[in-house]
């Protein structure tokens, strides 16, 4: 009989198939994982907390009736909102200049550049009414743009601004960061490498670590746009409005909630209700989620109510992904509160039977609303054909890029400036500060509880599989309701030491299965665990920041972090392994973590060092400060802790472990190998 011969490629395929089958054999049956698809476990767990938070918000809303209660609520919401985004910068000179003027029948357009922060340039178009027809000073309306690559030059925004100017109101339409002329990161050839939602999310990773939010920069740009309007002699500084669509609707909603100077607002295609948003659409890019906002607000309804009775018109589209049912829910919440204050007529809605966008009927509704509240005239304004400005007419910079202007400072530069100051502060505090107080600060930011406060998990042995010289127990570790950690316990027939390895890997417990089994054959006891959201429970939800985006931002909105939750999983698993295998002897765990789960593993070991004999990290982010200095980042959404860099960085924790810790192949914010860690 002829012998069978296989090519090297065929052999590799067969080996891979065999390994895959073996890994599947060692997986915990799906029905053992929280009664639903394993990939949805974290989402179900977080959704239950969201439901509780929403119920508490609704109960608090119903109790808010008297003028005193409403005023106290508004003050509290504004303070909480500002704290969550990291506060606002100090005003600095605008250094504004008009760089050109374009005339159109019935109005003129000034091309503007101003600095919302020193050398942080904003490009804008000021649409001014014909002075022969309308006598200045005019009301002024700011128009932050939605997510359009051409920003202020986009047809819908130009048209809306021109419509206001044709009816006696000035309009300042400006580019948000990473749109229009304000690309913040320039790639090869000087062109913006990122723009819009993706860019906002990338910069948002750094903002979160600094205790800020992308929204902080957008809000401040809008407030400085008002400063600019009020500086113009043609504008009445007491009659200021704000309108924008989509991302511009987000900015309008934030600005009308926070800035007392806005006398009337009309956000378009953004305002729904927070519960419906999360139910129908989920989380979005980074400026549209605020840290801890699900814990009492501000919900979207709050933002409409935070400056009641200042007039607000909700511009909504029937077929928008910002759910129309939620828009009406928010209107009802706001209308009831405005009515209690005696101003029911100051909040209303326009529902256009259209898809997402700033369509003509919405623009006309906006113009009529601004005319009513800023001009004191109820007029049936209709929109004529608008002669749009071409790109060379609306461009404010020589080549369409603010970052090419001399001395230009991007959001990345501003974040880096702040991080450099924080680094000096961190170095001093972790060199001479009280260690217990420093660790208390880490616990406060991450939410990681003291080991003795963590309840002991329930552990189910699903099956025991005999192997040559060892056995594998398939386990389900349940540290809290709704969370199951599939695990494998490798028990040698003759253990070679009195310690046990706790192995966690970002790809799950079977990612390095062959190596684990070989070690078990050699007498090493190993507990390999899928931390929540890894391995079998890897999230299947989608988002701008990858498959973990939705769950990470839900946790963020709940004031929590995936890092903190996974660190507690490490502690719970380590304590179980110690008690099960070594009789609970101190320092009995050899912790090893591969990939991004190294960050929670580092936290667990630094906060409870007595539990661990040694700690080995491989392929883990070198430092959070690297996210700031690298600017670009990839797959960092599970790694952030809000405000972490205001108190500590990963190397600060690493230094406390001394010789107990070894780090192999540390990576930077893009996942590339790096040789160094930040101090």
Image (spheres, grey):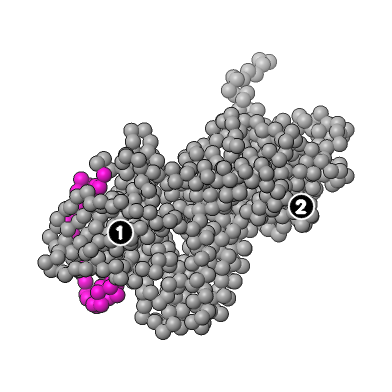
Q: Which residue is mark 1?
A: 228
What residue is shown at x 49% (from left), y 61% (from top)? 82
Estimate how packed mark 1 is, as few (under 14), some (14 to 19) or many (20 or more) residues with alpha carbons within 10 Å. Answer: many
Of the pair 345 and 649, the residue shown nearer to us: 649
Of the pair 39 and 299, the residue shown nearer to us: 299
Residue 254 shown left or right of residue 77 in the figure: left
Q: Is residue 216 above or below residue 313?
A: above
| Residue range (magenta) | 368-397
Residue 291, image x, y percentages: 54, 58
Q: Is residue 517 above or below residue 63?
A: above
Residue 21 shown left or right of residue 668 in the figure: right
- The circle drawn on residue 652 is none
Residue 25 shown left or right of residue 252 in the figure: right
Q: Which residue is mark 2?
A: 451
Q: Quadrant of residue 324?
A: bottom left
Residue 401, image x, y percentages: 31, 42
Q: Quadrant of residue 268?
A: bottom left
Q: For the view shown, which residue lies furthest in the top direction?
A: 2
Residue 504, image x, y percentages: 69, 41
């Amino acid at each position: 009989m002829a012998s069978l011969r296989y090519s090297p490629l065929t052999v590799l395929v067969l080996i891979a198939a065999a390994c895959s089958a073996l890994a599947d054999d060692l997986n915990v049956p799906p029905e053992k994982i929280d009664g639903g698809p394993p990939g949805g476990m974290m989402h179900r767990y977080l959704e239950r907390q969201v439901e509780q938070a929403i119920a508490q918000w609704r109960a608090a809303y119903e109790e808010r009736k008297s003028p005193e209660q409403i005023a106290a609520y508004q003050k509290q919401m504004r303070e909480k909102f500002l704290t969550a985004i990291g506060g606002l910068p100090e005003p600095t000179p605008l250094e504004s200049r008009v760089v050109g003027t374009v005339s159109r029948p019935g109005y003129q357009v000034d091309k503007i550049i101003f600095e919302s922060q020193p050398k942080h340039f904003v490009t804008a178009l000021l649409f001014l009414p014909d002075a022969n027809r309308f006598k200045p000073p005019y009301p002024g309306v700011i128009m932050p743009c939605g997510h359009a690559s051409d920003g202020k030059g986009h047809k819908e925004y130009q048209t809306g601004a021109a419509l206001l100017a044709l009816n006696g109101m000035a309009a300042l339409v400006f580019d948000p960061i990473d749109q229009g002329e304000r690309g913040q990161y320039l790639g090869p050839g000087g062109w913006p490498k990122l723009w819009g939602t993706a860019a906002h999310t990338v910069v948002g990773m750094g903002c979160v670590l600094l205790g800020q939010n992308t929204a902080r920069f957008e809000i401040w740009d809008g407030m400085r746009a008002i400063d600019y309007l009020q500086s113009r002699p043609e504008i009445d500084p007491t009659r200021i409005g704000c309108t924008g669509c989509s991302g511009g609707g987000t900015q309008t909603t934030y600005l009308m909630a926070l800035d007392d100077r806005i006398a009337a607002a009309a956000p378009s295609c953004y305002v729904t209700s927070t519960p419906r948003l999360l139910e129908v659409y989920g989380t979005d890019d980074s400026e549209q989620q605020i840290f801890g906002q699900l814990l009492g607000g501000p919900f979207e309804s709050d933002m409409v109510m935070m400056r009641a009775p200042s007039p607000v018109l909700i511009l909504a589209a029937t077929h928008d992904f910002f759910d129309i049912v939620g828009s009406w829910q928010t209107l009802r919440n706001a209308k009831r509160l405005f009515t209690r204050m005696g101003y029911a007529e100051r909040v209303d809605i326009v529902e256009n039977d259209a898809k997402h966008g700033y369509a003509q009927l919405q623009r006309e509704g906006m113009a009529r609303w601004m005319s009513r509240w800023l001009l004191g005239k109820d007029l049936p304004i209709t929109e004529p054909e608008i002669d749009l400005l071409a790109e060379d007419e609306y461009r404010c910079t020589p080549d369409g890029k603010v970052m090419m202007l001399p001395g230009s400072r991007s959001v990345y530069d501003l974040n880096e400036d702040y991080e450099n100051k924080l680094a000096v502060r961190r170095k001093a505090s972790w060199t001479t500060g009280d260690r217990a107080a420093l660790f208390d600060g880490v616990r406060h930011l991450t939410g990681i509880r003291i080991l003795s406060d963590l309840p002991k998990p329930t552990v189910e042995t699903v099956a025991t599989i005999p192997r040559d010289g060892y056995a594998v127990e398939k386990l389900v570790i349940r540290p809290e309701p709704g969370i199951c950690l599939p695990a494998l316990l490798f028990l040698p027939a003759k253990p070679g030491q009195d310690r046990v390895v706790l192995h966690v890997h970002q790809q799950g417990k079977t990612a390095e299965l062959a190596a684990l089994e070989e070690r078990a054959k050699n007498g090493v006891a190993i507990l390999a665990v899928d931390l929540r959201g890894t391995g079998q429970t890897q999230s299947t939800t989608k988002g701008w920041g990858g498959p973990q985006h939705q769950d990470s931002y839900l946790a963020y909105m709940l004031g929590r972090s995936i890092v903190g939750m996974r660190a507690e999983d490490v502690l719970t698993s380590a304590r179980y392994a110690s008690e099960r295998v070594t009789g609970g002897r101190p320092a009995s765990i050899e912790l090893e973590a591969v990939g991004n789960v190294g960050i929670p593993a580092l936290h667990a070991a630094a906060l409870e060092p007595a539990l661990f004999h040694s700690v080995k990290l491989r392929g883990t982010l070198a430092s959070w400060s690297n996210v700031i200095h690298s600017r670009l980042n990839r797959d960092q959404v599970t790694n952030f802790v809000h405000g972490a860099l205001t108190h500590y960085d990963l190397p600060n924790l690493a230094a406390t472990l001394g010789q107990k810790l070894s780090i192999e192949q540390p990576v930077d914010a893009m996942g590339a190998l790096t040789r160094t860690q930040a101090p």
